[in-house]
Amino acid sequence: EDGYDLWLRYGQPGGSAVSIPHTSPTLAAAAAELRRGLPRTTRPIVLERATAPEVSALGLKLGALGDEGYAVRQVRLGGRAVTLVTGNSDVAILYGAFALIRHARTGGNVDTATLTSAPRIKLRMLDHWDNLDGSVERGYAGQSLWDWWTLPDFRDPRYVDYARANASIGINGTVLNNVNAKPDSLTAPYIAKAAALADIFRPYGIKVYLSARFSAPIEIGGLKTADPLDPQVAAWWKAKADEIYRAIPDFGGFLVKANSEGQPGPRDYHRSHADGANMMAAAVAPHGGIVMWRAFVYAETNAEDRAKQAYSEFKPLDGTFANNVILQVKNGAIDFQPREPFHPLFGAMPKTPLMMEFQITKEYLGFATHLAYLAPMFKETLDADTYERGPGSTVARVIDGSIEGHKLTGIAGVANIGRDRDWSGSTFNQANWYAFGRLAWDPSLPSEGIAREWAEQTLGTDPKVVDTSVAMMQGSREAVVDYMTPLGLAHQMSTSGHYGPAPWIADLKRPEWNPVYYNQADARGIGFDRTATGSDAVAQYAPPVAKIFADPKLTPERDLLWFHHVAWDRKMASGRTLWAEMIAHYDRGIDYVTGMRTRWDGLKPLVDAERWQKTATYLAIQQREARWWRDASLAYWMSLNHLPLPAGEAAPEHDLGWYKNQTFPFAPGQGK
Ligand code: BDP
């Protein structure tokens, strides 16, 4: 048991009778999955489209299934009692098959199953930050899954397993390469390699997309410029798109990181992001393709609070994007921190479809070794109220298009997948991939329910295993927040590797690369003043939200230091001072990890040895490092505030100099 099977850990095939009156590669895949994944059922299972005469004759009330929604019904077909899996497309039926397997493997009865579900979001994407040299930016699960060297000839069976896993949770798009893109990915040899992957993924309903480097017309096209308003540049992209679509007829489109962290973009030519996006969108439009344009920008020349820059740049462009452009916005305004308030662009661009970008790989949450279940974090953002059109205008409703009636809707997760046998670097990291897919399908699913169904399928249905795992998972992300960046702190991680504490770093070239920029700690207090007396980032939110964040008395304590510079002796809700409260949070985080170790120890007889041992070892690492985070942070804060520790609190194990001297000869995932 090395984790390779993910949540599709079927065991012995049940050998159910499955029939496909009208077959296709997708339906054949669905049938194969049911034969492997279901226990023996009494009724035969029939996979057939809702539009087929024998199904439509049943007059089933299926509701609004759309293209991808599925229904499972107990019916009589041709005189037999059967379980029918249906939908308006073959892929919908495939999703129904996986839903039926999930139902069966989480305690449901197939012979009585009645299931109906349709996705709320259209593009449900994984973004791979995979480089052509096989490294993965911010990847902690080994080398890239894509073997660019042996593609397109060798079609590793693992690519099929990747597609199965994704289809089982409803993922329908994959961006193959890093947003820090090399132009080579758009050359003929790489298009052929991408086409081979597209062929493998197609039966599973997964479209391939590519990250495109904005300056590719210069680098591989021999042009003098990449100016989006230059007709030759536009013609180059059009020809390039035509070439790609000849190889991949259902190619999804481009993802673009422009004028961000040194990437080229339209601003290099004094053009707007809309000029750039629309020019590329025009190239793919005739083929039905789209452009996902990232809003993650902050510029060297801009002295504005980094948290404000994306809004300042994009908000004025609302209404100017072509209708096959969707803006991809990270969940928070800085960068995938353990906790961020929702990005102020959500709710601020009614005329533009916005898609969510979450990070599944745990760049800032302890890489692969720390256990942090991210569904509660994803939900926190999705459930946040933007007040775009009054109360109830949640981020989920912004991205599902329901507030403004947008048809193009999307959600992306930066993948945590690599070539490690267990795909994600640890068993519990698999749950984040799983949870992302489930929430992309339906953002209203509860994180605990997702954890439970994941655990049942991945670790077995023994109630003790399931209850314990779910209990560990549910509070795990909050524990990371507590021991790394409590009460609204952010970006206190060491430079470039983003691993381990370094709140003291102050000497990097750009101010907003330094942890001290984010903590603003001094003798008097700590936190970033983003109110009117500071950067006034709060003014980017709708008035009812801004009012709360502008007032330290109204701001939830979990976001306090994100928005306010607060005195060390400020009284908190608990009655403690801020200083004592911070320490209590660090301690609580460590205690939670200690508790997870104890709980996991209790499962030793119930979980296979290989997965149990690796998890136990990682929890020990996490516990040691939670302590490291607390101690290093306290040592630094005490060097500024000179406050004593509350009675009974352990002093940091080492002095500040010791923590500052920790170096890492190698941290995975750093390459650009
Ligand atoms: C940051 C990562 C960096 C990415 C960047 C991005 O540190 O490696 O290139 O985001 O999203 O989180 O473009």
Image: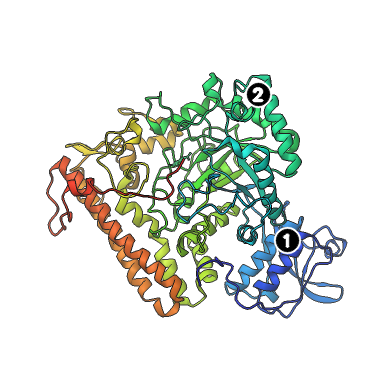
Residue 68 at x, y percent in the picture: 70, 54
Quadrant of the displayed image that contains ligand 1: top left
Q: SS at mark 1? A: helix
Residue occupying the point 37% across, 38% down:
548
Q: Are marks 2 and 1 in contact (CB under 8 Å)?
A: no
Residue 628 at x, y percent in the picture: 26, 54
> Residue flagged by tag 2: what amino acid is it?
Val
- Residue that numbered label 1 is attached to: 93
Residue 531 at x, y percent in the picture: 33, 31
Q: Is residue 491 left or right of residue 98?
A: left
- Residue that numbered label 2 is attached to: 233
Residue 197 badge: none
- Of labels 2 and 1, earlier in sequence is 1
Q: Is residue 189 left or right of residue 503?
A: right
Q: SS at mark 2? A: helix
Task: Specify whether residue 205 is in view.
Answer: no
How far apart are the two marked residues, 2 and 1, measured between alpha carbons?
42 Å
10 Å crowding of disc 1: few (<14), some (14-19), many (20+): many
Height in image: 627 above or below 412? below
The image quadrant of residue 539 is top left
Task: Specify whether residue 656 is in view.
Answer: yes
10 Å crowding of disc 2: few (<14), some (14-19), many (20+): many
> Residue flagged by tag 1: what amino acid is it?
Ile
